Image: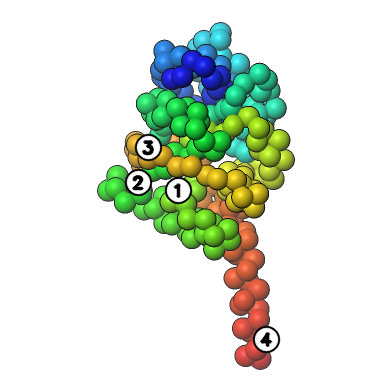
Amino acid sequence: MNDNKKYTIIIPTLNPTDKLLTLVDELTNNGFNEIIVVNDGSGEEYNNIFEKLPKSVKLLNHETNLGKGAALKTAIKELKNVDGFITVDSDGQHSVEDVIKIANELLKYDIVLGIRNFNLKNVPKRSKFGNKISSLVFKIRTGVNLKDTQTGLRGINIKYKDLALNTSGNRYEYEMNFLNNLAKNKIKIHTVRIKTIYEDNNDGSHFNVIRDSILIHKWIIILLVIVLLVCILILV
């Protein structure tokens, strides 16, 4: 990692496992000294995990589960005197090697996304399908071809702090909304290939297929409903 730039690692988490502790230890051992963990309303039985975090980690707590987007914004509000921030998932999907890659790319680009390969055999079918739909919707709406719109590994220059805070959405739709805002403001999105890690078919994910899919894709759903209604009126 480049010592001339200062990046804060943001890790939102809900009901974490020991993978969170492993991630934090590896990040710390690789020179990431500014880490914010947001406990997004985890149950009391997970307190032992948070108690084991190093004292150097800033732990922020939501009393109830507010969603990934809300957790990210809670952490972003705390940022001071840094060059940027990197969001990392706590469920083992992101390797520290790839976090370092994002940090290095931030030296040259303002927005860096870690892109996974969804054509691999270990990727769950629902993830493949969901990402293809998201990428298609994003391209239709913005004209930008992005192979992985759902990636949680993102590097962001601090000058876009306000844009991140003002992006709507409190759950998984927040990440898509942020990408839409980048495209709307014609801000270049740089991508780098990262490892595609799905352990136990990503059972640790808190993504609600129905609720979160509707929130993420409400734009295309509204459009399809309008088209359907127009077709019905024409036929009638």
Give me the C-alpha separation between circle 4 and circle 1. Answer: 37 Å
Counting residues from the N terminus, which is met first, the one under dot 4 or under dot 1?
1
Mark 4 in CB contact with mark 3 (< 8 angstroms): no
Give me the C-alpha separation between circle 1 and circle 2. Answer: 8 Å
Counting residues from the N terminus, which is met first, the one under dot 1 or under dot 2?
2
Mark 4 in CB contact with mark 1 (< 8 angstroms): no
Q: Quadrant of residue 194?
A: top left
- Which amino acid, mark 4? Leu
* Mark 2 neighbour density, 10 Å: few (under 14) some (14–19) many (20 or more): some
Can residue 177 be seen here? no
Q: Which mark is residue 233?
A: 4
- Which amino acid, mark 3? Ile
Q: Nearer the viewer, residue 139 or 137?
A: 139
Which residue is drawn at the image coordinates 63% and 69% (left, top)? 223
- The image shows residue 174, relative to residue 21, as above or below, that is below
Residue underneath mark 1: 148
Q: Quadrant of residue 98?
A: top left
Residue underneath mark 2: 117
Q: Secondary structure at mark 2?
A: loop
| Residue 58: percent from left, percent from top | 60, 16
Q: Left of 231 or right of it: where is 92?
A: left
* Mark 1 neighbour density, 10 Å: few (under 14) some (14–19) many (20 or more): some
Which residue is drawn at the image coordinates 41% and 12% (left, top)? 29
Residue underneath mark 3: 194
